[in-house]
Amino acid sequence: MPPPVPPHRLLDHQGGALEGHAHAPGDEADHDHDHDHDDFGAPNAADQALWIQDNVILHSVGIDIGSAGTQVVFSKIHLQRVADQLSTRYVVVSREPIYQSPISLTPYQSETLIDAAALGRIIEAS
């Protein structure tokens, strides 16, 4: 039985001084190439400030009131400033649903009038 392979560590690279460094077979994902470990902790404050200026995280509420059903969705939205034009225009980078209510029958007072109080209770319950 061969001896166990020790885990790969950041010190194995010695700050990039080992150009021919390779992982041993069976080590992590069987890397067959050299690579840098350049994640050395938290980003510096200047990079973080620039990221904050160009990125906005919002929480949104979407209320779909249809003729038959009503649903409420809460989401987290990541907006990012368009980088190629020094503009104030943002685009949606990602949308993560946080909560999605069950679909409820839309309440009506008459054939053409939605019951606002009952609708408010559906939204409030969400």
Image: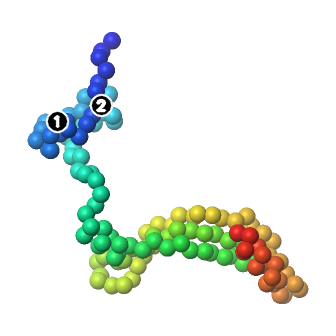
Q: Is residue 64 among what the camera can see?
A: yes
Q: Amino acid at mark 1?
A: His
Disc 2: CA contacts within 10 A as few (<14), some (14-19) or many (>=20)? few
Coloured how?
A: rainbow
Q: Residue furthest right?
A: 110
In the picture, the disc for residue 7 is 2
Left or right: where 88 falls relative to 100 = left
Q: Position of residue 45 (x, y in %)?
A: 27, 67
Q: Is residue 69 among what the camera can see?
A: no
In the picture, the disc for residue 21 is 1
Residue 109, by quadrant, is bottom right
Q: Amino acid at mark 2?
A: Pro
Quadrant in which the C terminus is drawn = bottom right
Please determine whether, in this image, residue 87 is positioned above or below residue 100.
below
Front one among 95 and 111: 95
Left or right: where 65 falls relative to 1 = right
Front one among 107 and 42: 42
Left or right: where 105 falls relative to 60 = right
Q: Secondary structure at mark 2?
A: loop
Quadrant in which the N terminus is drawn = top left
Question: What separation in Å lies between label 1 and label 2 (alpha carbons)?
Answer: 14 Å
